[in-house]
Amino acid sequence: MFKINRTVVLGAILGGSLIFLPPFNGVGAYVKDLLDSRPERTALFIGNSRTFYHNMPFMVRSIADSAGYPEKLHVEMDAEPGVSLADHMSSSKTQALLARSWDHVVLQVLSSEQYSAQHSGGTWEVAANLIREVQSNGARPSMFVT
């Protein structure tokens, strides 16, 4: 008769459950992508807390998948709480990401810089420069404001 080792079973359950917890839950998405034969579209999200919290890029991808979008949406994010587009413009990380090939680049303006003309500073000039940079690299820019 086959004897089940309790420690092995509990270890397998614990190990299997890890793929559902951050930071390991990306493993499931990676495996799913390997099995997904749809053509790929790429999207880079650049922003701050409104993009960062709740992982907006993954939410967009989940919505696209659930709606039957005919292409696999590969998303990446460059976002941290409190970061402005000017911060991104001068960031070597952001510039390295923008130098890569993207189909779409989504830009998010810092909320506090949208309230009034007095608070916006050079936000809209920076946004326009980023949009031109995105377009010059062949991507389609989108912007959302809150």
Image (cartoon, grey):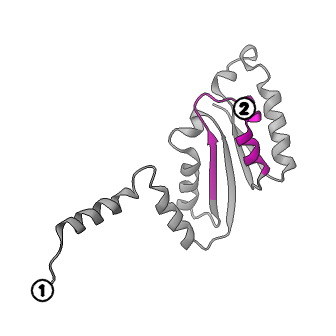
Q: Which mark is residue 1?
A: 1
Name the quadrant containing residue 117: top right
Upstream in sequence: badge 2 or badge 1: 1
Amino acid carrying mark 1 in the image: Met
Amino acid carrying mark 2 in the image: Leu
Please state the extent of the stretch shown in magenta in the rendering: 74-99
Residue drawn at point x = 67 percent, y = 69 percent: 39
x, y (%) of residue 87? 71, 30
79 inside magenta stretch = yes
Q: Is residue 68 above or below residue 104?
A: below
In the visual, does 88 lie left or right of 11?
Answer: right
Q: Nearer the viewer, mark 2 or mark 1?
A: 1
Quarter containing the C terminus: top right
Residue drawn at point x = 69 percent, y = 22 percent: 113
Residue drawn at point x = 85 percent, y = 41 percent: 132
Q: Callout 2: few (<14), some (14-19), or many (20+) C-alpha neighbours within 10 Å?
A: many
x, y (%) of residue 86? 75, 29
Quarter containing the N terminus: bottom left
Say which of 114 and 85 sits in front: 85
Say which of 62 and 82 sits in front: 82
Q: Which mark is residue 62?
A: none
Q: Most extreme residue toward the top, as rendered?
A: 118
58 inside magenta stretch = no
Label 2 with label 1: CB-CB less than 8 Å: no
Name the quadrant containing residue 40: bottom right
In the visual, does 58 lie left or right of 112?
Answer: left
Residue holding disc 2? 85
